[in-house]
């Protein structure tokens, strides 16, 4: 068994880019990751995509001369990219392959005019329950219970759009006020437009190999994956909370973390503002009921004691589904190397990635991946 490190990462720009096909987006990410790792090839590739057409992984890799090796495509909703990372990590850890590429790709702008169309074979989808509505239900529950205020929901958007001002790859950035966020167009009550992630195109990649002690290698302390259990009256929590909590507990135990407070920086799944609030609580980064207050008071902002989503998160960097998890991973790698520029978290040594994958009927989410990374 080998200790695994991330040797190189790369991403495309994120945004609505219908004029750029998946080959062009993947080229940006893979070329940068290979250059970062100082390699020209790998032994195998895992590719995460949700709406990519059949055979798309082989086609985009062929354009870069990556052929004649195993290429495996995985789909795990929004956690597809981090699922590809988990499988690549396991392949290196067990010695199945020596050097592996994890790639995430998605072009949403040509697939959907707006929100993702609910899946008609899923009873919840057939009833019209799209993801904005599912997250809106969680926000409404938090508001009803007094666990968050409208201003605290908006504060997550304000924070992450401000973080994205320092991320040249981000789709959106800007200085917004709480009033502007709450005054933007209503999407799914109580979530307004600026509280929802945009439709995005993009790619992200990582090269994994056994740790060799290189000065820029970022160690993988642990990575865990779970799919949701039945979500019913037995849980007092909103949708998504329990699978995040349980996946994180598994990852933290494997990483040998004495306390979650040891983490210095986190990239979490904030497809909607309530998502970041629920996730920070489920991870234990903040106490139950304190997620909204943490965003409002600056605890989870750059310069705060628990910086979350310095990249701008899904809300502002963008959310190309298959690429999102590896984009989060790239951000944490840059943070742990001290290469994040004006969004750098000072002294970051331990970082976390959490990606939550979509909804499945009667389940507490499709999938969740949590990874703990360590600075060189």
Image (spheres, rainbow, N blue to C red):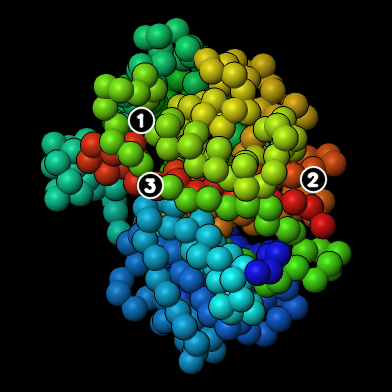
- Which residue is at a point 67% across and 47% down the rendered structure image? 255
Q: Locate the N terminus and report the quarter of the image it occupies.
A: bottom right
Residue 268: image quadrant is: top right
Residue 17 picture location, percent across and down: 45, 61
Distance between the alpha carbons at the discs numbered 1 and 3: 13 Å
Mark 3 vs mark 2: in front: 3
Q: Residue furthest bottom?
A: 68
Q: Is residue 29 visible?
A: no
- Pick whichever, 8 or 19, lies toward us: 8
- Point out which mark residue 311 bears: none
**CA distance for labels 3 and 2:** 29 Å
Whole-percent x, y for residue 331 in the image: 66, 51
Residue drawn at 62 percent across, 23 percent down: 286
- For the residue carrying disc 2, how many other residues have a C-alpha within 10 Å: few (<14), some (14-19), or many (20+)? many
Left/right of residue 268 with respect to residue 34 in the rendered view: left
Q: Which mark is residue 239?
A: 1
Residue drawn at 32 percent across, 62 percent down: 51
**CB atoms at circles 1 and 3 under 8 Å apart?**
no
In the displayed structure, 66 sits above or below 274; it is: below
Q: Which residue position is annotated with label 2?
A: 349
* Dot in front, 1 or 3: 3
Q: Is residue 362 left or right of residue 297?
A: left
Give the residue pinned by disc 3.
227
Residue at disc 2, secondary structure:
loop
């Amino acid at each position: 068994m080998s200790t695994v490190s991330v040797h190189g990462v790369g991403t495309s720009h994120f945004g609505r880019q219908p004029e750029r096909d998946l080959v062009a987006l993947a080229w940006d990410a893979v070329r940068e990751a290979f250059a970062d790792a100082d390699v020209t090839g790998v032994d195998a590739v895992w590719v995460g995509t949700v709406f990519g057409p059949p055979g798309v992984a082989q086609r985009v890799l062929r354009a870069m001369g990556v052929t004649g090796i195993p290429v495996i495509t995985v789909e795990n909703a929004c956690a597809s990219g981090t699922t590809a990372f988990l499988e690549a990590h396991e392949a290196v850890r067990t010695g199945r392959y020596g050097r592996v590429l994890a790639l995430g790709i998605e072009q949403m702008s040509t697939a959907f005019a707006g929100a993702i169309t609910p899946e008609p074979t899923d009873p919840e989808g057939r009833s019209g329950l799209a993801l904005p509505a599912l997250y809106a239900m969680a926000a409404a529950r938090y508001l009803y219970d007094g666990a968050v205020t409208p201003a605290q929901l908006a504060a997550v958007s304000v924070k992450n759009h401000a973080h994205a001002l320092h991320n040249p790859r981000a789709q959106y950035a800007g200085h917004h006020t709480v009033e502007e966020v709450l005054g933007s167009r209503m999407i799914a009550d109580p979530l307004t437009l600026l509280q929802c992630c945009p439709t995005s195109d993009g790619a992200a990649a990582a090269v994994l190999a056994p740790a060799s002690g290189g000065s820029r290698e970022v160690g993988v302390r642990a990575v865990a994956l779970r799919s949701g259990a039945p979500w019913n009256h037995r849980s007092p929590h909103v949708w998504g909370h329990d699978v995040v909590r349980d996946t994180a507990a598994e990852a933290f135990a494997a990483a040998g973390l004495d306390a979650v407070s040891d983490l210095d920086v986190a990239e979490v799944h904030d497809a909607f503002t309530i998502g970041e609030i629920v996730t920070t609580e489920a991870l234990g980064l903040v106490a139950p009921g304190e997620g909204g207050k943490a965003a409002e008071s600056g605890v989870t902002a750059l310069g705060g004691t628990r910086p979350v989503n310095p990249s701008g998160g899904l809300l502002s960097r963008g959310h190309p589904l298959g690429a999102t998890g590896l984009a989060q991973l790239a951000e944490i790698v840059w943070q742990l190397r001290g290469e994040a520029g004006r969004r750098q978290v000072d002294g970051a040594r331990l970082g976390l990635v959490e990606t939550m994958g979509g909804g499945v009927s009667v389940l507490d989410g499709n999938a969740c991946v949590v990874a703990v990374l360590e600075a060189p």
